[in-house]
Image (cartoon, helix red, strand yellow):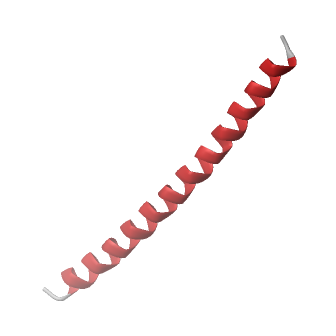
Amino acid sequence: MTATGINSIEKNGDQQRLNEGSTNDNDDKLVQEFSHLLEKSKQLFNGL
């Protein structure tokens, strides 16, 4: 394998780590939104 091939593999690994970070941000936003909606639904249910 050439040095270029190794660099390409390293770049792909770096890109995967960046994508995972983005996924974690999306997951955090989703969990936060779900928690907010759950709390809101509890409040609405208690008002019945």
Which quadrant holds the C terminus?
bottom left
Q: Is residue 4 left or right of residue 34?
A: right
Q: Is residue 44 left or right of residue 16?
A: left
* Image quadrant assignment for residue 1: top right
* Image quadrant assignment for residue 6: top right
Residue at the top extreme?
Answer: 1
Residue at the left extreme?
Answer: 48
In the rendered image, the vertical position of residue 7 relative to residue 5, given as above or below: below
Residue at the right extreme?
Answer: 3
In the rendered image, the vertical position of residue 22 relative to residue 44, given as above or below: above
In the rendered image, the vertical position of residue 30 relative to residue 41, given as above or below: above
Q: Is residue 17 left or right of residue 28?
A: right
Residue name at image x 64 percent, y 38 percent: 16
Residue name at image x 67 percent, y 43 percent: 17
Residue name at image x 53 percent, y 50 percent: 23
Q: Position of residue 37 (x, y in %)?
A: 31, 72
Residue name at image x 60 percent, y 46 percent: 20
Q: Nearer the viewer, residue 32 or 6?
A: 6
* Image quadrant assignment for residue 13: top right
Q: Position of residue 10 (x, y in %)?
A: 77, 31
Q: How many marks?
A: 0
Q: Nearer the viewer, residue 30 or 39?
A: 30
Q: Position of residue 42 (x, y in %)?
A: 28, 79
Q: Position of residue 27 (x, y in %)?
A: 49, 56
Residue at the bottom extreme?
Answer: 47
